[in-house]
Image (cartoon, rainbow, N blue to C red):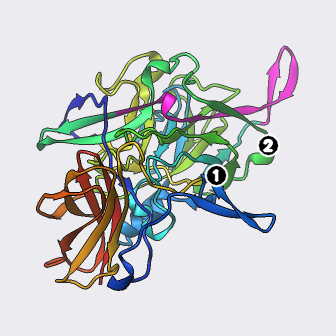
Amino acid sequence: MKKSLLSLVALLGLTSAAIAQTPSFDVPKEQKNIKTNGTSYVLKNKSLVPSRRAESYSNWYNFVGAYEENELLGQTLSGFVNFIQPDTNLCMVYSDGAKSKLGFHIVGTTFDPKDSSFLNKAEVLTRYNPYTVDSLAFTQFYIRQVDKVNIGGNMVDVVDTVYIQYFNITGIKPGGYTLTANPGVTYRYATPATDKLSYTSLLNSGAVKTDTLLLTKEWADSLILENGTPKSFIGRTFVSTPNVTTKSTNGSDGTTTLFAYSVLYRPMIKAALGDTGLAYNGSTVFKKYNMYGVRLGSLDGHDQLITSSNKINNMFVTNFQVRYGQTLFGFLKSYLPGTVFGSTIFFPSFVHLTTPNLSTKNVATGLSGVQVYPNPVASNATADVVFDLTAPATVKAVVTDLNGRVVSTSTAVNCIAGQNAISVSTQGLSKGIYMVTVESNMGRMSSKLTVN
């Protein structure tokens, strides 16, 4: 755990920029002086009729893959099996003889398709794009060492249970913390709402849906033994169909389109305090139990520190004391984000979503249509940021890299109602992808800029 973790910052009103969809080709200057009709048309019965929606968009999102490519520059996380238990009774014996309790009772992750890491993989959505999670996939491991149990004198089949809970913003609580090493910066995260978690059942009443998975012996194929000692694990992809729809907003809060899910395992036969689940050193396990885990990932010494409320993708766990209504940190009650560990923990998963409208226009704020020309642009050159205003405003353009660091800021200019343009310089910028954010008192909106 990060020893410099200091304090919680209450984030009641997170702000974020909307990310506009941009063309991937150059547009000559002669073609810039145009207006775009705000109405889309679709062909029905040989005639065009107005439509308030753009074409529906569907795609798979894998944050860990996108993060490895864009933030870790191709480095890969080390995968490992993390076993889940509803209490802290069961232990693991490792090859050096060390014995350690299994402490994670719940694992889960918060998903945000507004993260710019997705630029090379899928469309980056905005806070104006509600979406439905059609499918969710992750890797699970089910080790079954007991098939029958005596109940009332009868031998019955053991059926273990996994609960998967899904959340939209109605059951998600965004938050933040600071580190003593960097007290001026707030690091963001989001987890299910702590006040809706039951310490008895470990289920959260804030979930919009709960799936129940009954594990029978047909699911068990995960453990490979060599001379009775565990040597490797085989994971199985599990796919669910949440059909959970997120929220959207025309305000400044960028957290309303968050989606989260959590996984809880409840074995039919519970372990007694100090019992051994698996022994890697050849020790004899006297009483065997069924075990369930998921694939997690980490990289030694790497911190995923999220400073932007516009891109909250973090794993979370409940850890040890939570089972008994206690907490490891009073200000991080129950759920611990994966970002607070010395080596950040990730939960690799695949989310398939559909959004009925890729429009990024914010009618309420009066700022829309942000695009950059030319795009791509050469290094040490200039590009025009074009946008529309419904009323006069003072505007500036801020250029950031994909880690959210500001690399340049234009001079603030007074703009008129209608179409406007601000020039930004690429002088000193290396090749890569950047975000240009138009900021005004009428709103904020961003667009991608590629420097060749």
Magenta-drawn segment: 147-174
* CA neighbours of label 2 inside 10 A, class few (<14), some (14 to 19), many (20+): some
Circle 2 sits on which residue? Answer: 217
Query: Which quadrant of the structure image shows residue 46?
Result: bottom right
Residue 339 part of the magenta-drawn span: no
Residue 372 percent across, percent down from the top left = 32, 71
Q: CA distance from mark 1 to mark 2?
A: 20 Å
Residue 247 percent across, percent down from the top left = 52, 38
* CA neighbours of label 1 inside 10 A, class few (<14), some (14 to 19), many (20+): some
Which mark is first along the chain, 2 or 1? 2
- Residue that appears at 47% across and 42% down: 258
Q: Comparing marks 1 and 2, which lies closer to the viewer? A: 2
> Which SS class for mark 2?
helix
| Count of numbered badges drawn on the protein | 2
> Which SS class for mark 1?
loop
Kind of residue at badge 1: Gly
- Residue that appears at 67% across and 45% down: 143
Depth order, front residue of 139/353:
353
Residue 162 part of the magenta-drawn span: yes
Residue 228's tag is 1
Depth order, front residue of 183/253:
253
Q: Is residue 4 above or below residue 267?
A: below
Query: Does residue 131 appear to the left or right of 339 in the view shown?
Result: right
Q: Is residue 235 visible?
A: no
Residue 377's tag is none
Q: Overall secondary structure of the magenta stretch?
A: strand
Residue 222 percent across, percent down from the top left = 67, 52
Query: Does residue 25 appear to the left or right of 305 in the view shown?
Result: right
Q: Is residue 86 above or below residue 350?
A: above
Kind of residue at badge 2: Lys
